[in-house]
């Protein structure tokens, strides 16, 4: 009897948590769908070609704003590489695509706190740029790029 | 119910209302883009639903089995290397969109999980184990290997930095 009550109480507690976060999840997916629809691949590919540093910042910024399946970042990254965009800029885009979420920021702030969400996204943005340069120069150092 | 949870609940409904108003306004200006966005939304929702089910199950099990004492031991301030390994591996294995995982991490934090490990979990999500063959296909094996090693290293660095920054008190 006690075990059954514990199970029911736990189920109710889990349901309450879910009902609280459901509007955030639905709202975020609606917002993401809007951003993805408005932001086409053609727009992003025309933006590059302004030098390594600006291209890297641009790649990291696009990845931060973009919200979609990571597979889309590989496809876009592959196309951009083929179009002559540097590996550093493409890496920054691919990494920020998953680690930084401007679109998801309101949901992250609501669920994990504004201070945490802001700091985490800023640090992740900086880290992505560092990773992009480190990956490129490591590959070059090893003679693999 | 804690104030934080009440605030989260009300904020969520307000946020959804704002997004729906945006959709309503956009449908007046650009109906084609609105319907395209709704098609995309339906597609993503269908992908998210199974993950939501999985997260609901994990939350239920966590609420049922995990005790704050246990969380503090394995993911709290004294968890050491065990905590880092658990958070990094957890992030790498976490599937689907990020939103359900925010819920899980928020609940684990209430039970004592460190901010550093939450940040490490979220950063290591950049390594998508099921997508690694595709990444290798597009960028090569050497690139994928080097990138993944840096991502693991930086998930820990970003965790430490985020914790240091968020633990600072103003004034």
Image (tube, helix red, strand yellow):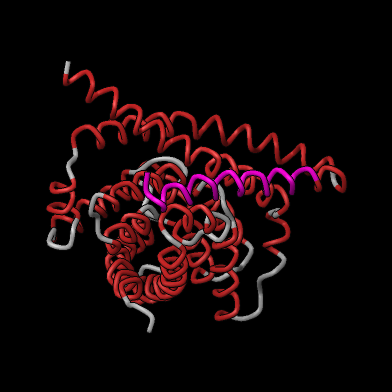
- The residue furthest top is A1
Residue under the image location 36 percent in, 50 percent down: B106
Q: Is residue A46 left or right of residue A2?
A: right
Q: Position of residue B161 (x, y in %)?
A: 32, 73
Q: Residue furthest bottom?
A: B171
- Closer to us: A143 or A120: A120
Residue drawn at (32%, 49%), measured in percent from left and top?
B92
Q: Is residue B121 left or right of residue A114?
A: left
Q: In which image quadrant can residue A79 be found?
A: bottom right
Q: Which residues are magenta?
A: B1-24
Q: Main secondary structure of the magenta part?
A: helix
Quadrant in the picture for residue B130: top left
The part of the image, by quadrant, that contains residue B165 is bottom left
Residue A3: x, y in percent?
17, 21
Residue B107 vs A125, above or below: the answer is: above
Instruction: Let me know if residue B21 is in the magenta part.
Output: yes
Residue A11 magenta-drawn?
no
Q: Count the marks.
A: 0
Nearer to us in this view, B48 or B165: B165
């Amino acid at each position: 009897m006690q075990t059954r009550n514990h199970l029911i109480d736990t189920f109710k507690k889990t349901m309450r948590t879910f009902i609280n976060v459901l509007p955030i999840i639905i709202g975020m997916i609606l917002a993401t769908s809007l951003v993805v629809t408005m932001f086409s691949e053609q727009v992003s590919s025309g933006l590059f070609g302004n030098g390594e540093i600006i291209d890297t910042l641009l790649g990291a910024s696009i990845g931060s704003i973009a919200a979609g399946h990571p597979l889309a970042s590989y496809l876009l990254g592959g196309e951009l590489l083929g179009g002559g965009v540097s590996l550093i800029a493409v890496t920054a885009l691919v990494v920020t695509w998953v680690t930084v979420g401007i679109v998801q920021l309101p949901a992250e702030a609501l669920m994990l706190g504004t201070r945490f969400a802001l700091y985490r996204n800023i640090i992740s943005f900086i880290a992505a740029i560092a990773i992009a340069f480190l990956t490129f120069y490591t590959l070059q150092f090893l003679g693999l790029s | 119910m804690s104030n934080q949870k009440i605030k989260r609940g009300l904020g969520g409904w307000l946020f959804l209302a704002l997004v729906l108003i945006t959709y309503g306004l956009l449908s007046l200006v650009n109906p084609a883009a609105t319907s395209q966005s709704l098609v995309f939304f339906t597609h993503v929702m269908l992908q998210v639903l199974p993950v939501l089910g999985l997260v609901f199950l994990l939350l239920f099990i966590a609420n049922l089995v995990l005790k704050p004492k246990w969380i503090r031991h394995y993911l709290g301030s004294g968890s050491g290397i065990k905590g880092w390994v658990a958070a990094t591996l957890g992030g790498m294995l976490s599937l689907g969109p990020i939103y359900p995982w925010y819920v899980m991490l928020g609940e684990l934090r209430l039970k004592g999980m460190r901010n550093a490990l939450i940040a490490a979990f979220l950063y290591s999500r950049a390594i998508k184990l099921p997508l690694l063959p595709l990444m290798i296909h597009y960028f090569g094996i050497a690139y994928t290997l080097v990138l993944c090693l840096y991502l693991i290293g930086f998930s820990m660095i970003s965790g430490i930095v985020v914790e240091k920054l968020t633990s600072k008190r103003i004034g």
